[in-house]
């Protein structure tokens, strides 16, 4: 190459290097690849999840402006969308509050959409906490969370809209079921004030539910739950009143007085709790009545048992009394009937039916007493018959002796029947004794008739003799 061209070649090489460097300086910056550290991928969104990058556009530089390509690019950039930390916190708070309401009313078991809403919120919450932990807060990188929480809010609102009516209906059913239980315990009569108060709470809850919005359903649910507790109180109160009536009517308190005192204390405790009107106090009142009823039940059970044995003692005493006058011999049917009742009472007692057995024991005692009284009546009749027989025999004996017929056949029979009647009386066989005493009386009369006939015959013969 000629020496004269060497400087030109060198200059050309320098120019090429300058152009290459200028080209590198004006090239666009490359976007970060997805899922790099610091990215915020929101559940439910696809595509690039990294921080949105400023956009640039190429523009032709007017001639004579003096702008370089780099200056032109900087002047056409668009700001990346951002969310403030305050707004993001508010969105999270709203979504979290709605979720809390759904959890409070246990809508997870009622609304199928709950599961998806909860899963999405859990993922959003993880990303949200990560963004808040970053210092300084990067609003552009956290921007996708805004849409995520807005969608979460909508999802939870849907869950509440579908679930609150269902929960309200379920709570109403619980209240109505408890009302039916209270009705079965005759709470409307035995615990009228409690039953009436519970019904008022139920009616009030129904009125709240008519609004058919979140506030209305929320108040209705609370009202139904309150009514459920109130009907529970009414039910337990009615049971307590029934127990107390049994205790007072049967005198059971004396058998287990310490338990009765504890029952009465719990019974009185509920009065003050009901007066406060709060659901918590009503729950405590129902618990107090349940405890009182457990004591009352013990008093009634043990009272019935002890009284059953008292009844048995009374029946056995009545039986012994009846046997003392041989009621079994004198009124066998009445005595046998009393014994059947006693046997039935004993069987019920052995089976644990103490209240029923007590009534039967008392019936048996009454039956034995009837047999005793009837026997005493027979004894009195027997004594009268014996007295009449003795009187007749004495008169007949005197009459027979006066007519020289003191040992006639009829008097002998009369005396034999009277002796037998006496033996039977001593054996407390009053019926048979009376029969034989009456036979003695009859034979005494026959003796009188025989004596009178003999005397008349003698008188007639004497008259005929004198007439001749």
Image (cartoon, rainbow, N blue to C red):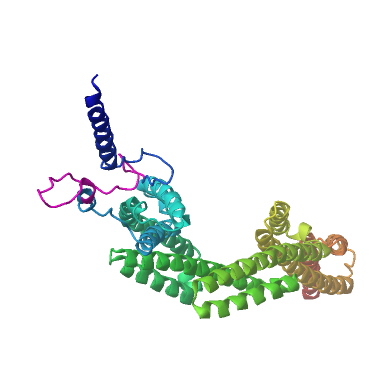
Residue, far top: 1
**Can you tell which quarter of the image residue 9 is in?**
top left
Q: Is residue 395 visible?
A: yes
Left-right relation of 239 to 453? left
Residue appearing at x 57%, y 72% in the figure: 285
Residue appearing at x 78%, y 74% in the figure: 463
- Camera-side residue: 26 or 163? 26
- Camera-side residue: 83 or 363? 83
Residue 338 at what x, y percent from top left? Answer: 70, 58
- Camera-side residue: 97 or 70? 70
Left-right relation of 277 to 58? right
Question: Is residue 190 placed above or below 139 in the rendered structure?
Answer: below
Residue, far front: 3
Residue, far left: 63
* Magenta highlight on residue 56: yes
- Camera-side residue: 365 or 193? 193
Question: Is residue 458 placed above or below 18 in the rendered structure?
Answer: below
Residue 99 at what x, y percent from top left? Answer: 40, 56
Q: Which residues are magenta?
A: 43-71
Q: Is residue 443 visible?
A: no
**Can you tell which quarter of the image residue 253 is in?**
bottom right
Left-right relation of 98 to 334? left
| Quarter of the image that includes the N terminus | top left
| Quarter of the image that includes the C terminus | bottom right
* Predominant SS of the magenta segment: loop
* Magenta highlight on residue 442: no
């Amino acid at each position: 190459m000629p020496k004269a061209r060497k400087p030109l070649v060198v200059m050309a090489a320098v120019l090429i290097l300058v152009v290459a460097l200028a080209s590198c300086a004006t090239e666009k910056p490359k976007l970060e690849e997805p899922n790099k550290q610091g990215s915020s991928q929101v559940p439910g969104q696809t595509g690039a999840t990294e921080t949105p990058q400023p956009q640039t556009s190429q523009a032709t530089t007017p001639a004579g402006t003096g702008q370089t390509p780099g200056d032109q690019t900087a002047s056409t950039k668009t700001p990346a969308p951002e969310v403030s930390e305050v707004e993001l916190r508010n969105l999270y708070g709203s979504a979290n509050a709605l979720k809390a309401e759904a959890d409070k009313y246990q809508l997870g078991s009622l609304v199928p959409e709950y599961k998806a809403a909860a899963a999405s919120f859990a993922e959003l919450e993880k990303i949200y906490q990560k963004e808040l932990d970053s210092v300084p807060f990067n609003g552009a990188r956290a921007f996708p969370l805004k849409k995520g929480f807005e969608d979460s809010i909508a999802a939870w609102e849907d869950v509440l809209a579908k679930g609150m009516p269902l929960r309200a209906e379920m709570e109403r059913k619980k209240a109505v079921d408890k009302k039916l239980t209270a009705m079965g315990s005759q709470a409307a009569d035995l615990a009228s004030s409690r039953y009436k108060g519970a019904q008022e709470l139920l009616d009030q809850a129904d009125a709240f539910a008519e609004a058919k919005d979140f506030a209305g359903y929320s108040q209705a649910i609370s009202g139904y739950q309150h009514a459920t507790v109130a009907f529970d109180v009414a039910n337990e109160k009615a049971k307590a009143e029934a127990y107390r009536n049994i205790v007072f009517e049967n005198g059971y308190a004396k058998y287990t007085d310490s338990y009765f005192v504890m029952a009465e204390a719990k019974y009185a405790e509920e009065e003050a709790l009901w007066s406060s009107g709060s659901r918590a106090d009503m729950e405590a009142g129902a618990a107090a009545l349940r405890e009182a009823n457990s004591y009352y039940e013990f008093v009634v059970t043990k009272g019935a048992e002890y009284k059953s044995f008292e009844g048995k003692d009374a029946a056995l005493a009545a039986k012994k009394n009846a046997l003392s006058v041989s009621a079994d011999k004198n009124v066998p049917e009445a005595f046998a009937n009393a014994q059947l009742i006693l046997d039935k009472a004993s069987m019920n007692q052995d089976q644990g039916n103490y209240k029923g057995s007590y009534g039967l024991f008392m019936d048996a005692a009454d039956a034995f007493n009837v047999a005793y009284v009837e026997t005493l009546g027979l004894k009195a009749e027997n004594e009268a018959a014996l007295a009449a027989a003795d009187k007749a025999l004495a008169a007949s004996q005197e009459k027979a002796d006066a007519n020289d017929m003191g040992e006639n056949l009829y008097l002998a029979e009369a005396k034999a029947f009277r002796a037998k009647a006496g033996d039977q009386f001593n054996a407390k066989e009053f019926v048979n004794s009376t029969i034989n005493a009456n036979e003695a009386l009859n034979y005494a009369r026959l003796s009188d008739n025989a004596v009178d006939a003999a005397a008349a015959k003698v008188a007639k013969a004497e008259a005929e003799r004198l007439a001749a």
